[in-house]
Image: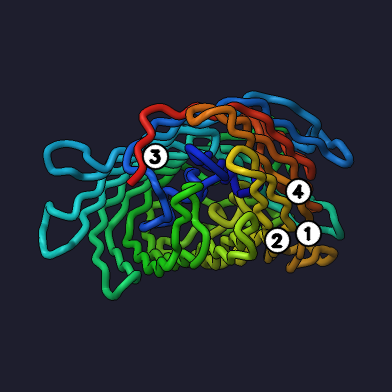
Amino acid sequence: MTPRVSRIVLAGVLGAPLAAQSFADLTEARTPANPYSSLFEIEAGVVGTHAAEEAKDVGLTSEVSWDGHVYYRDESFSSRSGTIEAYAGRDGVYAGFYDGKLIGDETVTRLEFRGRPWQFYRDGSYRGSNFVPSGLFEGSDYEGYLGFGKEADQGLYVELGPFYRRNSFRSSSLAGGSSSFVIPEDYAGYGGRLYIEQNTAQMDRRRGLAQSGYVLTLIGEREWNDSEGVIGDSASGETELPSALWRARARLEWYIPSTDTMTWEIYGRGGWNDQKDRVNNDDSSRPLGDQWADVQARLRISFGNSWTVTPFVQGQYSKISSNDPAAKDRKFFFGGGVESYFHLSEGFSLHGYYSYLDNESRPSILVDEDAHGEHMFYMGLVMRFGAQRK
């Protein structure tokens, strides 16, 4: 996966990278392709970004920083043999437990805690190829979720449950945007969420990765909140966050085998939010706007069982409604890159990537300051302990 949507990929014990594990994947996919019943993984490395034209007051800069994540999974947790997962990385923290025996009748009970301590928001519009900010601000959100799911048909999983989220905001450390821009006040939100997921993925047991099939997840949610006050200014428009909002998202992993050593991969995410959902539409961890999409076409090439190289092309779509008559409401972005794993042993792998996207609004590589650019690169070491195949 790309650094754009923060998809840090697990390395296989014997072969190529596995299906992605990141904050977004853990909170969106319900029945992902995963060959491990037990795993503790640490990844640490150096991440960097380079801006074609630096503008440090809006976060466009060339910067290098530390990066990594910790991931844990155990499918035999406690005497009930439930599954526990935990993750911590730059993109967020997650802890989840699910058990198919708690209620019975093949119903899965899922309890999750998720948080994004280091969020950056960019309110603005695109003029040509440049993103022009109206206001920049930071924040964090924490959520609890209780879901109940069941397999409705072979490979078709449906889950429904309530959530409660707490959002907090603070002024940005950057000087870009309007000095009169009013950031949102802290607020709490609650509502219900529906997951519908079709999984036909088949695993290659020799290499421990998905080889064919797909995982398609559709997510819909309704939120009520206690937000007060306005967001924005006279230039960008002062708006109030509605007391009730709707959101829809989709996620796709599609694997198409070509030869024994080459597999096509299509990875995609997208969303359609209430146009008045201004806070969520300014989320810089994905393409901005009330309608967005991020798609990659990848060719995974395996050189034996120790080295994989995956070149890819990428496209993004972003729809932003603004008061700027010179702005373009709909924008398309294109780019590409390459990702590679070299497996030193069953427990250690080198992981690196480079990607370019002609979108000035990419995720920050820092947690204490919004720093981003069109070019991104990473090099790190993956360490796995106690890995057990299913």
Q: Is residue 327 left or right of 148 when viewed as pictured?
A: right
Q: Do the residues labelled 3 and 4 touch (CB within 8 Å)?
A: no
Q: In the image, residue 243 lies at what x, y percent?
A: 41, 61
* Mark 4 closeness class: few <14, some 14–19, many ≥20 residues within 10 Å: some
Which quadrant would residue 381 be assigned to in this image?
top right
Q: Are marks 2 and 1 in contact (CB under 8 Å)?
A: yes
Q: Is residue 384 left or right of 333 when viewed as pictured?
A: left
Mark 3 vs mark 4: give the one in front: 4
Q: Are marks 1 and 4 in contact (CB under 8 Å)?
A: no
Depth check: give the residue in front, 347 or 138: 347
Mark 3 or mark 1, which has the lower sequence index?
3
Mark 3–mark 2 distance (CA, rounded to whole Å): 26 Å
Depth check: give the residue in front, 277 or 41: 41
Render colour scheme = rainbow
Disc 4 residue type (three-letter): Gly
What residue did someone put label 4 on? 337
Q: What numbered label is drawn on residue 316?
A: 2
Q: Residue at x 72, y 48 (%)?
A: 361
Secondary element at image label 2? strand
Mark 3–mark 1 distance (CA, rounded to whole Å): 31 Å
Secondary element at image label 3? strand
